[in-house]
Amino acid sequence: MIQLENVQKAFGNNRVLRGMTLEIKSGTSMVIIGGSGTGKSVALKCILGLIQPDSGKILVDGKDASTGDRDAFLAKFGMLFQGGALFDSLPVWQNVAFRLLRGSLKRPQAEAREIAIEKLRRVGLKAEVADLFPAELSGGMQKRVGLARAIAADPEIIFFDEPTTGLDPIMAGVINELIREIVVEMGATAMTITHDMTSVRAIADNIAMLHDGVIQWTGPVSKMDDSGDPYLDQFINGRAEGPIEAVR
Amino acid sequence: MNPLTLLAQLGRMVLVTLAEVGRASIFAWSAITHIFRPPYYPRELAISLLQIGWLSLPVVGMTAIFTGGALALQIYSGGARFDAEAVVPQIVAIGIVRELGPVLVGLMIAARVTSSIAAEIATMKVTEQIDALVTLSTNPMQYLVAPRVLAALITVPLLVGIGDIIGIAGGYTVSVQSLGFNSATYLKNTVDFLEPLDIISSLVKGTVFGGISAVMGCYFGMNSGRGAQGVGRATKGSVEAAAVLILAANFLLTGVFFSV
Ligand SMILES: Nc1ncnc2c1ncn2[C@@H]1O[C@H](COP(=O)(O)OP(=O)(O)OP(=O)(O)O)[C@@H](O)[C@H]1O
Ligand SMILES: [Mg+2]
């Protein structure tokens, strides 16, 4: 279980998170939606400790995320970064198997490579891609390699920052199904950021909408369409008119 | 302008600089301690040894040979003004080994290695690769910084030693080929004249300059601002800082070795 309690984060005068409170139960899929620049990526990075929140509490399985053994903490997580964040000095398969080639999860090289190729297949990439370098791939392929890397060590908790952005509709469907599978079959906890409403409906158990630095609405995906919340309504229907200003 | 505001601005500048020096020193200390802390990354170290050491050889060799040759010509023509042309081998040896070898190699390393380390790490930072490393339970100080610093500490003194030899060879070639020196005498004068302390000082300088080069590249890279502009600033800043620190350290070390 992941709990955020009144988390605040500002960059200079830019108050991004202004008291975000949210709970994600283990084994469920939470989707975060919200306007561009509202701090969705920042929230994920706060949980991982990549960004230090100014105040508030973040608990993972009841334990404070900022204290205790960092290695053990991070070993539970997989993260797909919005920009992919692949290591451009390493070939694709070594990117995917990064965790399996060093540190506490280290395995023999051949085995790590096999796992990498299997994970690549799951995100719809052929084995030939394994020996290419990230710079030789298209944007959507890079994104999927990032996804394969995030799930490579079968983490308990996985964060996906815009997993389907830049993918064709069929590939987006494949990825949505994969995320669903990971949650249902492997019992992982997933937290996904996306702007893609098809994706939201396909992968979410619950959704939360971030607006003005706080969670404007949260609830099960089934209640999304008749929430009665004008902000959420405007957002999911993509209307230019409404309480959310178009220029931010 | 109000003299007080001027003073305040000056004070602020001093404080900002001191704070930066403090942060860089803490970073340098942390970089060095991480060299000795497991896990170790031998593959990264091997790549760094190749990049910093082996691939710097051509530029170091070129710098040294031309400098040695020019130095011989200068001393010969300058020495002629007071009938001291014969001291070319000794002055070339001292000049290269104690001063020009380490300083020029250090500066070339700052140009070649510091800039590339800073640009590479800054790009990794800007594209979230450093964040990705952390989420993959890998400490960037251990994976990125320690191998580069260690490789520089090992290879730069070797490069300086090689630079010294090539520089002396440059002076020797010019002296024997066009200034009419006797080959055997030139070599004998060089060898007899150099003392162990000259060579030790040269290698110590090389180690220090290598450390400065790698640490500055890593420090500016890891603290890069965002975007392409951030990478550009980090690269420029790292080379400036490394070059100035190398020259300052050279002055201090020369004082330590030879002032008594
Ligand atoms: N490292 C940083 N330094 C300064 N400001 C930052 C930093 N990271 C994010 N921000 C700022 O925080 C705000 C939220 O950024 P964030 O990336 O979380 O947005 P987002 O909700 O993920 O948007 P998008 O949907 O476009 O990805 C932005 O205004 C951004 O400029
Ligand atoms: Mg984002």
Image (spheres, grey):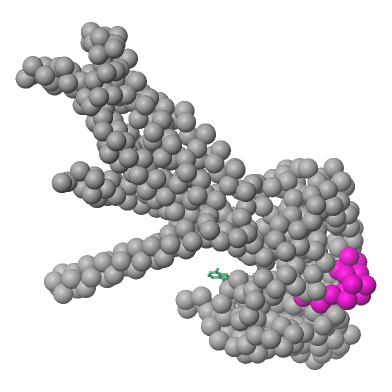
Left or right: where does residue A232 sit relative to residue B43? right
B155 lies above or below B232: above
The residue nearer to you, when weighing B143 against B188, is B188
The residue nearer to you, when weighing A227 against A150, is A150
Q: Specify the quarter for ligand 1.
A: bottom right
Location of residue B102 (image quadrant)? top left
Residue A178 in picture, x, y percent from top left: 89, 65
Q: Looking at the image, which residue is at 69% across and 81% down? A: A210
Q: Main secondary structure of the magenta part?
A: helix
A110 lies above or below B74: below
Q: Which residues are magenta?
A: A177-191
Q: Looking at the image, which residue is at 39% across and 50% down? A: B212
Left or right: where does residue A4 sit relative to residue A218? left
Q: Quadrant of the C terminus of chain A?
A: bottom right
Residue A156 in picture, x, y percent from top left: 80, 74
Q: Quadrant of the N terminus of chain A?
A: bottom right
Judge whether residue A186 is colored magenta.
Answer: yes
B70 lies above or below B231: above
Q: Is residue B61 visible?
A: yes
Q: Looking at the image, which residue is at 91% across and 66% down? A: A177
The residue nearer to you, when weighing B16 against B210, is B210
Judge whether residue A10 is colored magenta.
Answer: no
Q: Looking at the image, which residue is at 58% across and 84% down? A: A8
Left or right: where does residue A197 sit relative to residue A210? right
Q: State the residue lying farthest toward the right.
A: A185
Residue B256 in picture, x, y percent from top left: 23, 49
Q: State the residue lying farthest toward the left.
A: B82
